[in-house]
Image (cartoon, rainbow, N blue to C red):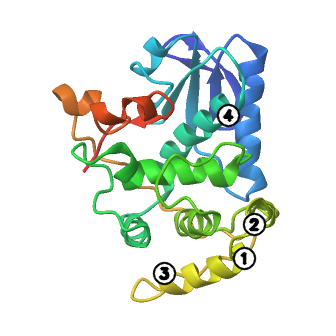
């Protein structure tokens, strides 16, 4: 298959990777398998790999309109997390309804889905992608957002996807914090707190709600706001270098 005349390798129906390096092709296959492992249909996406950040607007990753760009030479843990983060953006665009976004914002205590005026870590759209990368990935790297306790992340993952975090994740994360409260018990409390008018109920393992495809509306790029879409502000530029980006929407 091709994208703008550029040949690509279809690693799964609807998922095309543009990379000459076999390690990058394998990385794309790994990411697809992580969605499938969780019982989630991977997004329809074109994945482009670049050797430097110029292909990602100066960042390590970028996602927009069914296309993901990942700027890395190595196929390491950071690259895995970044790819899942950017694919998470596309999956959210294609599957998460407005009502589900509002429930997610309420659970996470956020005011903005993806307004350019909000810091990167305080945008629901970015937290959603980061939580998907955590839930689908290896969890070697900590989710780069506030309130990143495993139980908090798992509850938010379920609201977004309609499925539980893959089996074994909570047990392993709970063991990582032996002096803390039991993660599963904390997750149960968070689930109960998420119940109410929205009627959130955690799905059983492997289950999936009917997909709802809703494309995000872009507010466009303008001056410093667009330059700060990853990292939120000049004060958080260090974080911007280690996170993925997506065009801001209100």
- Cα separation, mark 2 vs mark 4, equals 23 Å
Disc 4 on helix, strand or loop? helix
Which residue is disc 4 drawn over?
80
Asked if labels 3 and 1 touch by Cβ distance under 8 angstroms, the answer is no
The residue positioned 75% from the left and 51% from the top of the image is 36
Say which label, 2 or 1, has the lower sequence index: 2
Say which label, 1 or 4, has the lower sequence index: 4
Query: From what the image shows, is residue 41 above or below residue 194?
Result: above
The residue positioned 60% from the left and 18% from the top of the image is 72
Q: Callout 3: 10 Å neighbours few (<14), some, many (20+)?
A: many
Which residue is disc 3 drawn over?
194
- Cα separation, mark 2 vs mark 1, equals 6 Å
Q: Position of residue 78 (x, y in %)?
A: 64, 31
Which residue is disc 2 drawn over?
174
Which residue is disc 1 drawn over?
182
Query: On the rendered structure, is 112 left or right of 58?
Result: left
Disc 2 on helix, strand or loop? helix
């Amino acid at each position: 298959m091709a994208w703008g005349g550029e040949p690509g390798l279809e690693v799964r129906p609807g998922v095309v990777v543009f990379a000459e390096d076999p390690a990058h092709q394998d990385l794309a296959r790994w990411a697809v398998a992580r969605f499938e492992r969780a019982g989630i249909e991977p997004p329809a996406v074109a994945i482009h790999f670049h050797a430097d950040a110029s292909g990602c607007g100066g960042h390590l990753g970028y996602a927009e309109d069914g296309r993901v760009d990942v700027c890395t030479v190595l196929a390491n843990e950071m690259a895995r997390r970044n790819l899942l983060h950017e694919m998470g953006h596309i999956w959210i665009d294609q599957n998460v309804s407005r009502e589900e976004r509002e429930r997610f914002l309420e659970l996470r205590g956020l005011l903005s889905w993806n307004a350019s005026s909000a810091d990167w870590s305080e945008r629901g759209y970015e937290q959603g992608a980061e939580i998907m990368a955590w839930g689908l990935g290896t969890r070697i790297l900590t989710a780069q957002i506030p309130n990143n306790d495993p139980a908090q992340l798992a509850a938010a993952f379920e609201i977004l996807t309609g499925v539980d975090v893959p089996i074994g994740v909570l047990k392993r994360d709970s063991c990582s914090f032996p002096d803390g409260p039991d993660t599963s018990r904390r997750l149960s409390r968070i689930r109960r707190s998420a119940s109410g008018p929205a009627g959130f109920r955690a799905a059983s393992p492997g289950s999936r709600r009917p997909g709802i495809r809703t494309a995000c509306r872009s507010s466009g790029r303008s001056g410093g706001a667009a330059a700060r879409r990853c990292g939120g502000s000049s004060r958080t530029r260090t974080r911007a270098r280690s996170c993925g980006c997506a065009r801001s929407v209100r």
